[in-house]
Each structure stands twice: as C-alpha cells, then as structure tokens.
Image (tube, rainbow, N blue to C red):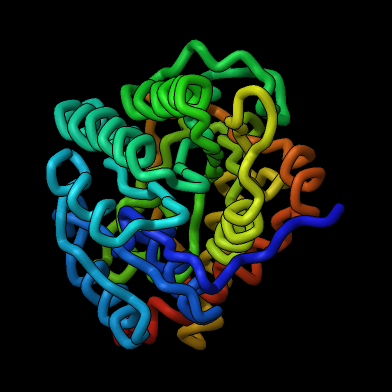
Amino acid sequence: MNYKTLDPCKTYLITGAAGFIGYYLSRKLLEQGCKVIGIDNINDYYDVNLKYTRLNQLERYEKFTFIKEDISNKEIVMIIFKEYKPNVVVNLAAQAGVRYSIENPDVYIQSNIIGFYNILEACRYNTVEHLVYASSSSVYGANKKVPFKETDFVDNPVSLYASTKKSNELMAHTYSHLYKLPATGLRFFTVYGPLGRPDMAYFGFTDKYFSGEPIKIFNNGDFENDLYRDFTYIDDIVEGIERLIGNPPIGVVQHKIFNIGNNSPEKLMVFIETLEIALSKALNKEVRFEKIFEPIKPGDVPATYASTDLLQEAVNFKPKTSIEEGLQNFANWYVDYYRVK
C-alpha cells in the first residue's frame, strides 16, 4: 500500500520532546530537514540529566526550537500555537508509569487530562492538519484475549494511568467528530532502548546490578505462568509514528487508533536472561542478576500482546527488532554512558 512520506517543508510541534520517544522522533524529523518545535516541562519524575542529555543532542540541529513549558498551562499553549503555527502536532507529553499513578494521581489528571485537553483546544483553533498522540497498551486492562486488537473492548482499565489514556482516545474522537480534526492515537507496547526511561524494568534491573542490589520480579516466581510483554524497540516505534504522521485519517470521523507493538511477546524471564547476556557481552564478563520474586503489583497486567495488522495495512510497517539486538544496543549504551565496568 502507498503512504505519504514526511513533508520537510512543514512545521512539527512535539510535546514531551525531552522524553524518550519525543527525543528520538524529534531527531528523526530533524535529520530529514524538518522544522521541529519541542515542548517539555523537564519534570523530575526520573533523572533530569537524561532529559538534558537528549535536549543537548537535539539543540545541535539548526531547525530545532525548544520551549520549556507545561502543556497544562492553556494560555501558554495557545500562545505557542499562534506564534509557531504548527502543521502537525505529536503529543507525547504525559505523566507515565502505571504504579506511580497509584501513589500520585494528581499529576496524571493535570498532565494527561488537562494538558491533553489544552492541546486539543489549540489544534481546534489553529487549523492543525494532523494530531498524533500517545495512548498506551495499558488501555487493554486485564483483557485475556490475545493478541490485543484495536477493536477490542477497553472499558475496564486497571490503573488510573490507563484511564487517562482511554480518556484521551475518547476526547480526540469527540474533537474529530465536532471540529473535523484529523487525529491518530497510538497504543505503545513496552518501549525500550538506549537513552530510555529509568523507571522501566530493564533499565531498573541494570541499575540494581551495578549498585550490587537484587532485582525484584513481580511474577510470584511462577515460571510456567510468567508475565508476557510485547517489548518494542524505540526505532520501531519512531518508524511507525513517522509513517503515520503524513497519513491523517479520512472519513466521516477523522480519528483512528493503532497498536505499535512487536507482535511477538516474550516471557519476562526470557527478557531478563537476554539482558544478562547483553550486559555480559558489553562488559566482557559474565553478568547474573540476584533475583527476588514477589507478587504481581496492583495495576500490572499478566500479558501485553499487540496485533499490528491495522498498522501494516495502513502504512506497510510492522516492528521487527529482536530483543537480542535491541537489548544489546541498550547494554552497550548504558556501559558507555555511565562508564561502568
């Protein structure tokens, strides 16, 4: 199937530009000569040094403009849209993390609900050609039927984070219906890679190893019924977004939702063993994590597994990076970045 490629003459506004996915997407667009306006509030949910490392790399590009602001400030958001007149908006700014939403629900409402509403309003009043926004695989809740399809019932979220993402999908659908705003929601499945988020398990396990601490695995030590995750490498996520950006939905309601996942779930223990092998190669010595097994945490789900048929049909793309390749890239980066031995 034919799909439209990026237009480097357009202006792309990316919220959460100092975040993991936001950084890689911004860099990909800039490499192709696009003008990118990045917004981020640089919050301290995790190590801000990583965010500044990403930003420093983006600021090498002449066509990158960074604005340190919070999308929950509607007045500021409206001013930015009016001044820079983005053609395409990619909303990746959000408070991430399933478990953290149990401890600190306020920030999820502020960023994921109010912030997203402000982005929708700004798109409505500024004739944006396409809004692409981050949803999450967490909207599938405790669904047992796999692989997860975009048409599945998703009205039983098991975390506040998932509820906010489901709300985003509903809000975007409404704005598409009322104001003819072309919008595409992306349900990401466990994204990993170099310069990633330290709150993600693979990064945390690596930190623990170098701190001489055991890792906690929340599967009750049940290897037969281990947790399954559809681990998706960052380059695959970015390619999926890039292909969809130039192809806004058409139809009566211009709103579509796509899974972006690896379509190849791995047992958590297999993922951990692969990470041990990758670190062993990066360090040139054997690495084995000390493991503590605990019960599954509230809000966690037993399996994530994406159907990617719709994505393939729309833009002829299916994520393909193996965990062996992806985790080796991460391990090499980690050892180099933190100068560990």
Q: Report the residue at 37% width, 80% height from top.
A: 63
Q: Report the residue at 53% width, 56% height from top.
A: 272
Name the foreground residue: 89 vs 243.
89
Q: Residue 148 placed where, x, y %?
A: 67, 28
237 relative to 25 in the view: left or right? right
Name the foreground residue: 189 vs 70.
70
Residue 32 to residue 252: above or below = below
Residue 324 to residue 241: above or below = below
Residue 13 to residue 216: above or below = below
Residue farthest toward the right in the current orientation of the protein: 1
Q: Taking the image as drawn, is residue 87 in sight?
A: yes
Residue 331 to residue 308: above or below = below
Q: Report the residue at 54% width, 73% height from top.
A: 8
Q: Taking the image as drawn, is residue 205 in sight?
A: no
Q: Residue 336 placed where, x, y %?
A: 38, 86
Q: Residue 337 placed where, x, y %?
A: 33, 82
Q: Report the residue at 55% width, 28% height from top.
A: 302
Q: In which quarter of the image is residue 341?
A: bottom left
113 relative to 332 in the view: left or right? left
154 relative to 207 in the view: left or right? right
